[in-house]
Structure formats: structure tokens, C-alpha cells
Amino acid sequence: MKLLSTNGFIIYAKKMNEADLLLSYITEDYGKITCFANNARKSKKRFLGKLEPAMLTNIKFYEKPGMTLDILYEVDLIEDYKNLRKDINIYLFLTKLVEISRILCQERDNNKNIFYLIRNIFKSLNKLETEPAAGRQAISVNSVLLKYEIYFISNLLKFTGIYPNFSNCINCSESNLYNAFDFNLKKGGVICKSCGEDKNNGFGYSEIKKLPVNFINLSNLMIESDLSIINKLAVKDETLTDCSIFLRDFLSFHTGKRLKSFETI
Ligand SMILES: [Zn+2]
């Protein structure tokens, strides 16, 4: 057995029995890993207070050849983004982020960008002033969270290789010059008018969606910019909400799973 060490964020925790836990992490060096933490709920020194969401920890784990589950040995706290667990709206955003990561990221598919994407979002949200400072307007937490949600999902789709094709019809390759094409959820790309209306293509009514206004521009900007630009971006909440709903529908259709974290309110 090899003892490995890396930094990571918890994205899933499940009680296995009295004291054991099954944990999934997005790590810096190994992508998503799932490990078994023996006696985790009783072992104060090795794990207590270090298995919360929105904590950057260094984890040491044993890798057993031929086994799918690693064994978590020890956890050390590096950075605690504790403000994310204090504000209910930020916490709800966090549940979306971890659920989507768990569903989209494959075990041991190492892409450091996903780890850095999550770290940048946590860092930035942890600094967010939720109370208005003297002489300044209060920042709308909901607007920030909506932007971050679209930022997170768009970038994660890019890093996992399933960012939709918005530039050409997926059926006939016609260029989507004016961003006017509808979207085919099943095929994961835009579809031109004539292909969409052609009965021979057999597209179901429910698989074709209108894209929210400016969605393509917004999503492309999200994958080309860093968070400092996104923070300054002014977009109406209505537009952001429409984009968020579209991304939720796309993710559900693509993964075949209901996203429970989107159903909390
Ligand atoms: Zn076409």
C-alpha cells in the first residue's frame, strides 16, 4: 500500500455505520477520489472538525492496488472558508457546487483546473461583504451567487469536455452567426431552424429549448474570464436566472439525473 498526499475539498460524505464515513474529494493531484474513513466520527485527532464542506485540507490516504476505494489516513486543515457556512444562500450555492462536481467529475480524472476553479470561487465568496459598508451600497448576494453559479457550471462543462457546441448546428454544421439557433438538449448543441423543423430528424418537442437571451455570449465570457472580471460584470438578475434554469435543464438531461440541490426552494 502506498501512502499518498494531496490537497482537496470534500464534495460528498455518507455515514457508513456508527463511526465510519465514505468521502469524496476533488483533489489537486488526483482528480476526484472516494475514500473510506475508518472510525472517522470518533477519531478526534485525525478528523474532527476537518471534514466540513468549504474547507481546504491536506489529506493523506492509502491507495490499495486493485481496489476502487482509498483509505483515508489523516486530514489537516489548510484554509477554512467558514463564511460560506454562515450565510444560508451561500450555503445553498455550495450544495449545488458539490452536487454538480460529484455528478460530472470522474474518479481519478485529474484536471487541476477543476480544483483551482473551486478554490477561487471559495476564496472570493469567503471575502464577500454581505452587510453594507458605510457609504457603500449593499452587494446583492443573490446576484453574485447567480453569476458564480453560471461561472462554475460553464467552466466545469469546459474542463470535463462537455461544453455544448453553440457555434454550429449539430445536425448540418450551419454557422450560428447571430446566436439565433435553438438548443437541442439531447444532442448537447444548437440546431438551426430548418433542421429543427424537419420532421425526418425525429427530434422530440421536449428536447428542443429556446436559449435565454444573451446566454451564449454570457457563457462564453464566463469561460474566457477570471473571477475579477466576473465580479465587475453587471447583468440583470432575470437574465441570470433564465441562464441558471437553462444550465440546470441541460445538466439534468445530459446526466439523466435530477439535481436535488436545485429543488431546495
Ligand atoms: Zn442544421
Image: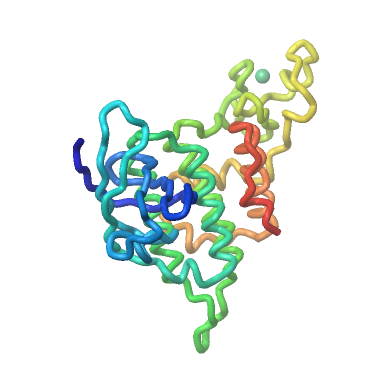
Residue 13 in picture, x, y percent from top left: 47, 51
Position of 61 with respect to 251 (left or right) is left
Position of 227 with respect to 5 (left or right) is right
Position of 193 with respect to 231 (left or right) is right
Position of 154 with respect to 39 (left or right) is right
Residue at screen point 42% across, 48% down: 23
Count the marks: how many?
0
Q: Is residue 212 visible?
A: yes
Q: Is residue 228 visible?
A: no
Residue at screen point 66% across, 40% down: 258
Residue 138 in picture, x, y percent from top left: 57, 78
Taking depth in this image into account, of 152 and 73 the one nearest to the observer is 73
Q: Quadrant of residue 216?
A: top right
Query: Which of the four quarters of the rendered structure image does ligand 1 lie in?
Result: top right
Q: Is residue 217 above or below residue 40?
A: above
Q: Quadrant of residue 124?
A: bottom left
Q: Is residue 78 above or below residue 174?
A: below
Taking depth in this image into account, of 191 and 121 the one nearest to the observer is 121
Taking depth in this image into account, of 126 and 259 the one nearest to the observer is 259
Q: Is residue 172 above or below residue 59?
A: above
User: Residue reaching furthest top?
Assistant: 200
Q: Quadrant of residue 208?
A: top right
Taking depth in this image into account, of 38 and 32 the one nearest to the observer is 38
Residue at screen point 48% across, 50% down: 17
